[in-house]
Image (cartoon, helix red, strand yellow):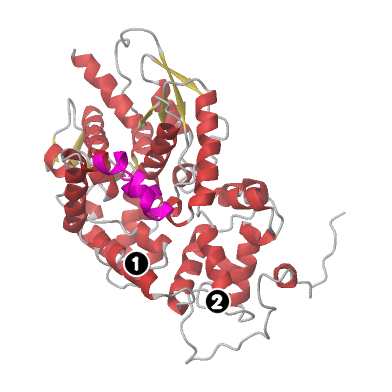
Amino acid sequence: MKPQIHPAFNPSLTARLRLAKRGTLPAPMSPAVQTADAPFSHLKDLDYSVVQQCMHCGMCLPSCPTYDETKLERNSPRGRIALMRSIADGELEATRAFAEEMYYCLGCLACMTACPAGVNYAELFEHARAEVEEKKVIDSIWRRLIRRVTLKWLFTKHARLKLLGRLIRLYSSLGLKSLVRGSRVLKLMPRRLGELEAMTPEIQPRFSDELIQLETTARGEKRYRVAMLTGCAQDLIFSDVNRDTVEVLAENGCDVYTPRNQGCCGSLHAHNGEWTMAQQQARMMIDLFPPSEFDAIISNAAGCGSHLKHYHSLLKEDEKYADLAKQWDAKLKDVHEWLVETGVREPSGTAPGRAQKVTYHEACHLCHGQKITAQPRKILKAIPGLELTELSESTWCCGSAGIYNITQPEMANKLLKRKIEHIRSTGAEMVAMGNPGCSLHITNGLAKCQSEVRVVHPITLLAEAYGREDK
């Protein structure tokens, strides 16, 4: 018999009171009355049906890395949604404690996979962080400066990012990196600075524009015309993966258009509470890639792709871009998704030598954000000479989570250690994944334990297999 619930029972309020009694948050205030001249609030002005979806069933709890670590309700999706709803209801105001909780969340979206009610946590999460930035509850001169330099200056013009990439490349090529790491300079500086320096990525010798033509013609029969997104960090650190992606698309009957000097898609801005800037970046991308001109717009980076598929939710109030954004969302495809959907051409022949063992780490925004899990495996299994071994907890976050490994190093390193242990236990020679952030974070983790496991994108392995055909 289905239990009867009193109509006055409010599980959201109950959860909030429980948190307040633990002393982590102020007790709820009386519900506020929204007036026409009330100040703007991302959570109060959000469609309330999104806010009230959560049934507080707790199915999300075992899937949440932060809850798994602390076992505190406030560190769970259910607890965070209770706090968001309390702000939407006018019972709480955004506070420093609320802000810290929202930035402690990885945004891995594993809770969305586990949720039986289909709660759109991704939308709630982004609006909650935007609420934090709107109310300036953790504002400081230093934080404001960092965000202004990075989010508002560096990641708004790709030429600036390329300049930074060239400087980092120079830092390595002149031997300065080896000199700094071999000296005692870093030991004399704050520990965190040394940790950040150790995370300095290797910049590719050439960027995507230097490796990929504006127009790449399909090999054999042309079936589709697609556009290729080269990304921002992806362009600097993994331009070779972008080149491999274009080669693979061409091998599968696609004419590929790759615009020059593409900018940031806005995912970094949306995930860090800069809603207006995320909208600006989305408009720029739509102008650069008119969706009606292509059969598909291809992304090979999980975090970017997950955000890129939701431009309509960003621009639905924009009269000029709302319909274009809806078309864009329909055309945006992850490269694994597109290849399997259109019929990937399996490489012919066999690989020289013995079979190589590969395992697969599922980037959070690919498996949880885009629900793409089978397609990368199908591609890996189609490559001659590869033996796929499943990875334990393959869908568990590695701790990268955008810039989480920079802002929350303690939690990020715990998750990284857990992931590295699982990778090494497979005995695989390679670990494949489809996201630049994961690739960097896991590469650093493997380097710390002096492991020689190769970190590689599945599409690169497919491109290498096509290359062996010619030989």
The image quarter containing residue 245 is: top left
Label 1: state its secondary structure: helix
Q: Do the residues labelled 2 and 1 touch (CB within 8 Å)?
A: no
Q: Which numbered disc, 2 or 1, marks the residue that appears first in the sequence?
A: 2
Magenta-span inclusion, residue 195: yes
The answer, for residue 244, to whether it is visible in the render is yes
Magenta-span inclusion, residue 319: no
The image quarter containing residue 150 is: bottom left
Seen at 49% across and 46% down, the residue is 399
The answer, for residue 311, to whether it is visible in the render is no
Query: What residue is pinned by disc 1?
Result: 147
Look at the magenta stretch and give its main secondary structure.
Answer: helix
Decide if residue 239 is on the left or right side of residue 75: left
Q: Which amino acid does label 2 sit on?
A: Ala
Decide if residue 50 is on the left or right side of residue 242: right
- Residue 114: give x, y in percent of width and height: 62, 47
- Range of residues picked out in magenta: 179-200
